[in-house]
Image (cartoon, coloured by chain):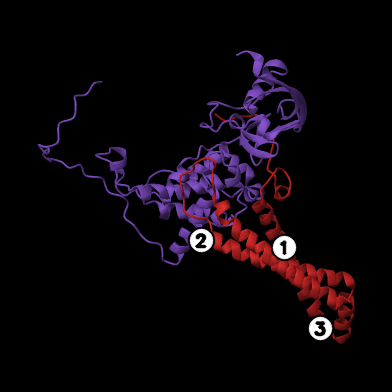
Amino acid sequence: MPETSLSNRTIDVYIRRYNPERDARPRWQRFTLAVARGMTVLDGLHRIREEQDPTVVFRYSCRMSVCGSCAMLINGRPALACNTQIADVASERLTLAPLPNFDIIKDLVPDLAPLFQKHRAVQPYIQRADMEEVEKPTGEFYQSPKELERYLQFAYCIKCGSCMAGCPTLAADPEYPGPMPLAQAYRYSADSRDSGFDERKVQAGASHGVFRCHYAGECSNVCPKGVDPARALQLMKRELVLDYLRLRRKRCPASVLRVPGEARRNPDVPAPPPYTV
Amino acid sequence: MASSTKHYPNRLGIVGWLLGGRWGLERYMYTLHRVTGLGILFYFVLHILVTSTRALGAEWWEGAMVRVGHPIFKIGEFLVFAAFVIHGLNGIRLIAIELGWAVGKAEEPVYPYRSSLHVQRPVLIGVMIVAAVFLALGGWDFLQVTH
């Protein structure tokens, strides 16, 4: 691509560097970057790597806000590097640091293993008495659009860790699962096909569970996909309170949708055209 | 595969309640709620200690009353009042939120995203206005008493 889109503007980019083999603690390193129109933070990092320092380490994959690999602290706010245009967040100075509340592996790469361990602990999958239907389905489970809406928002989570980095409770309490796992606990508990609430409430309602959240709301503020974990956590609290008071409505998990079976075609309705592929 | 690489701990800790990032209004309210709660708890302990001096005799009690009559304790009383107002009103907001009354229903995220923070924001602003009125009235009363 020709360089015609490059503006004349240059900014200072401060990157928090840490090499476990050499550094006792992270340090700031300054780079100068010519900012092009539409340049994302990830583009800027690539340019710094290509032109100034090939040892700068960062994690990325899809470049389009789907994989969640490139989350980092951009000017003091957790965000995806591929989804943040430099011009939107910096006019003269851009600071890039690894996500807080996770150990640093190297430079801008956080260790997300605890996030996935906590996620696994809340049993983020459909649980039913008839698990053979889940393993070897004979049909689709019935679910109305209204039932879908109850959890769909929370199903958009890409596990980037931004919400975990923004959570002040997690910052001070390592045993707290954090917004992402707890939001996923609600996502599956609110699913009309699931009946695993009683298993998940052990983790979610524990002393270091969802009631440690006092709605700082930063998880929802920084979520790049609009998942709103803070809302999921509050709705989970309500479910737990209702369950404690024995007021929670028990529901049977959705049953398999039966197909019409041996229905006969209405002779007035023409047959569909033959398959073309 | 187990890694022997040294990782650097990067947890913000309590310092992260205020520093470490560019945060939103609700997060600072979270910090204020905790600080005011701890302040009220500190006052409660102090109050128990002061009133317990009566058990040691009238002289101890009168000595304690002279000490707490110092102007710095008057300012402290106003701070306790302010902490009580902020913590109490914000606590009501948090109860409404934590029972799912002020966060709205789940909705499909459409950019620009509108989260539960936007739903509860009017409640937060209402709390701040009521708290400001209480603090102004309390401050006026405090000035009347001290002069």
- Determine whether label 3 and label 1 are within 8 Å by CB: no
> Distance of mark 1 from mark 2, alpha carbons?
24 Å
Question: How many C-alpha atoms fall within 10 Å of the one at disc 3: few (<14), some, or many (≥20)?
Answer: some
The chain identifier of the residue carrying mark 2 reads: B
Sequence-wise, which precedes: disc 2 or disc 3? 3
Give the mark nearest the N terminus, 1 or 2. 1
The answer to whether residue B96 is above or below residue A200 is below
Q: Residue at x 50, y 53 (%)?
A: A204
Q: Name the residue under label 2.
A: B101
Identify the amino acid type marked 3. Arg
Identify whether A167 is placed above or below B126.
Answer: above
Identify the element where label 3 is drawn.
helix
Which-is-in-front pick, marks 1 and 2?
Answer: 2
| Image quarter hosting the C terminus of chain B | bottom right
Q: Give the side of residue A198 with respect to residue B91, left or right.
A: left
**Badge 1 and badge 2 both on one subunit:** yes
Q: Chain B hue?
A: red
Residue drawn at 56 percent across, 40 percent down: A115
The residues bearing labels 3 and 1 have C-alpha atoms spaced at a distance of: 28 Å
Q: Which image quadrant is residue A243 in? A: bottom left
Of the chain colours in the picture, the one used for chain A is purple
Say which amino acid is labelled 2.
Trp
Task: Pinpoint residue A44: horizontal percent, then vertical percent.
Answer: 66, 24
- Residue, disc 1: B36
Q: Mark 3 lies on which chain?
A: B
Q: Quadrant of the N terminus of chain B?
A: top right
- Does residue B45 appear in the picture of this structure? no
Q: Residue at x 47, y 54 (%)?
A: B105
The residue depicted at 17 percent of the width and 42 percent of the height is A260
Chain for numbered disc 1 = B
Q: Is residue A111 left or right of residue A138?
A: right
